[in-house]
Image: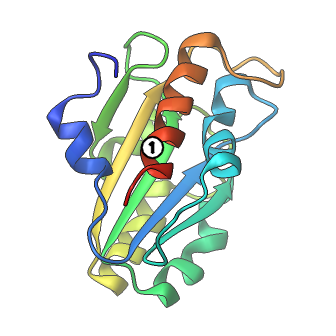
Amino acid sequence: MSNSWTEEVLHALAPRGRTLVVTLGSVIRGDDGLGPFVYARVKPSRPDIRLLDAGTTPESIAQDAIDWKPDKIILIDAARFGGAAGEVRVLRLEDVNRQAALSTHSFPLSVTFSVVKEDTGAELAVIGVQAGSLAYREGLSSGVQETALKLVHFFNNIT
């Protein structure tokens, strides 16, 4: 794994009890398609791990997240934090709106997931992957695709 897969990142990705992985993004905006790319390829082998793809409207899955009563929620989204394309960081929920790759999230992520966190009592981990290109095009840049495939491998190999 790349150097950006620190102990902090690995800890944030590790499931705990009922774990909900929420992917975010738009497939028509280059690297913002990271979330849907991961969602389409992860096939959890455990019933206590569930994925939801929120696309660009995370508020649309908030009630599903609350109803599932997760112990941990992991958000995965492309971000802008000044790193190298594909670099992975754990972000604070308060910083997500400033670092989200696009302003197309129709409602602030921090508000949506603050409510979900409060209603469920779940631990919340926000994983940001530095976007390389957010141009209107399909497909991920090479650095982001490499990280996306590592995320897929990570979640598909949880036993």
Tell me the residue at 41%/35% (across/down). 128
Tell me the residue at 68%/39% (across/down). 37
Tell me the residue at 26%/38% (across/down). 9
Q: Closer to the camera, 26 or 96? A: 26
Residue 64 location in percent, x, y?
Answer: 58, 81
Color style of the picture: rainbow
Q: Closer to the camera, 37 or 121? A: 37
Against 35, residue 20 (above or below) is below
Against 81, residue 157 (above or below) is below
Residue 159 location in percent, x, y?
Answer: 37, 61
Residue 3 location in percent, x, y?
Answer: 26, 16
Query: Residue 145 sits in which quadrant?
Result: top right
For the view shown, which residue lies furthest in the bottom direction? Answer: 67
Q: Quadrant of the N terminus?
A: top left
In the structure shown, which secondary structural element does the residue marked by tag 1 occupy?
A: helix
Q: Mark 1 points at which residue?
A: 97
Amino acid at circle 1: Asn
Against 42, residue 101 (above or below) is above
Residue 100 location in percent, x, y?
Answer: 50, 37
User: Alpha-carbon neighbours of circle 1 within 10 Å: few (<14), some, or many (≥20)?
Assistant: some
